[in-house]
């Protein structure tokens, strides 16, 4: 609630400020007398408009105030009640600010059968013919009407790559830290196309928990194609060199 001032400090609107009891009586229209506490001050709203505040004694409304807004006509001493309300003070417990559903919704809250609204200004997308990156669709497909109307923008790709890389299928997951080799050396790694190829692939191992999912090249799991593979046998045992360069002492020549 706006900062309250004591009645005694009001100099401009004494007529309204002194109408404490009429303000209290007006509250009987919306509550009972036992729910109205002491008068705690007034708020000067404007010229010939003033609000009286009373402590609210309703259970569960600690820190709230009954507010009675009064006004008077010019050169008149007749007080008129304009509005009755219940307002929160600085210490009041209030509901959190309203957040539109579109802003508070998370991707995991949506199922595959629920349609999402169209976003004309989605920063993650650009018109298909505007994309000039390595990921762009072939122009001939667009000209034939077979291309997509919109494709990922540079911002959209960067946001996607960051999200994938920092997910459970990136290098920092427990399985990746425990793995003895990364996905980049696994035969089941199917590389992606475009700019994603240098960072991600799709796992094609049905025994892996990541089967059919995008994984980073430095991800890993226990289903690596070379896990526990026998070590390659040497074709021959390398003998010690006849001349060991590391043991040669180089002496400076004399003149």
Image (cartoon, rainbow, N blue to C red):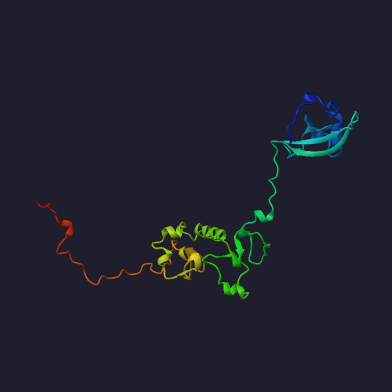
Depicted 177 relative to depicted 7: above or below: below
| Picture coordinates of residue 99, whole percent (x, y) | 68, 50
Residue at the far front: name it.
Answer: 255
Which residue: 14% across, 56% down? 248
The image quadrant that residue 83 belongs to is top right
| Picture coordinates of residue 17, whole percent (x, y) | 83, 28
Q: Name the residue nearer the viewer: 23 or 184.
A: 184
So how many labels did they put on this image? Answer: 0
Which residue: 86% across, 27% down? 15
Which residue: 77% across, 24% down? 9
| 237 displayed left or right of 166 | left
Residue at the far left: name it.
Answer: 255
The image quadrant that residue 145 belongs to is bottom right
Residue 16 appears in the picture as rendered = yes
The image quadrant that residue 20 belongs to is top right
Which residue: 49% across, 64% down? 195
| Picture coordinates of residue 11, whole percent (x, y) | 80, 24
Residue 209 appears in the picture as rendered = no
Residue at the far bottom: name it.
Answer: 144
Depicted 25 relative to depicted 245: above or below: above
| Picture coordinates of residue 63, whole percent (x, y) | 72, 36
Q: Name the residue nearer the viewer: 175 or 245.
A: 245
| 238 displayed left or right of 91 | left
Q: In the picture, which quadrant includes the N terminus?
A: top right
Q: Name the residue nearer the viewer: 60 or 114.
A: 114
């Amino acid at each position: 609630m706006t900062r309250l001032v004591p009645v005694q400090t009001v100099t401009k609107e004494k007529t309204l400020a002194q109408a404490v009891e009429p303000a209290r009586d007006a509250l009987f229209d919306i509550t009972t007398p036992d729910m109205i506490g002491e008068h705690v001050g007034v708020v000067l709203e404007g010229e010939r408009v003033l609000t009286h505040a009373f402590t609210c004694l309703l259970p569960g409304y600690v820190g709230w105030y009954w507010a009675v807004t009064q006004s008077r006509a010019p050169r008149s001493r007749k007080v008129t009640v304009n509005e009755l309300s219940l307002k929160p003070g600085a210490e009041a417990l209030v509901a959190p600010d309203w957040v539109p559903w579109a802003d508070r919704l998370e991707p995991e809250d949506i199922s595959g059968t629920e349609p999402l609204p169209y976003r004309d200004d989605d920063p993650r997308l650009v018109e298909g013919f505007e994309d000039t990156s390595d990921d762009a669709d072939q122009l001939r497909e667009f000209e034939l009407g077979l291309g997509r109307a919109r494709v990922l923008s540079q911002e959209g790709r960067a946001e996607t790559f960051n999200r994938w890389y920092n997910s459970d299928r990136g290098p920092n997951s427990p399985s990746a830290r425990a793995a003895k080799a990364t996905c980049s050396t696994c035969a089941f790694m199917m590389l992606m196309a475009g700019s994603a190829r240098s960072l991600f692939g799709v796992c094609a191992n049905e025994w892996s928990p990541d089967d059919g999912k995008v994984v980073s090249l430095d991800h890993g799991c226990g289903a690596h194609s070379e896990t526990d593979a026998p070590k390659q046998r040497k074709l021959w045992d390398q003998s010690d060199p006849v001349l060991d360069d590391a043991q040669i002492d180089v002496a400076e020549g004399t003149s």
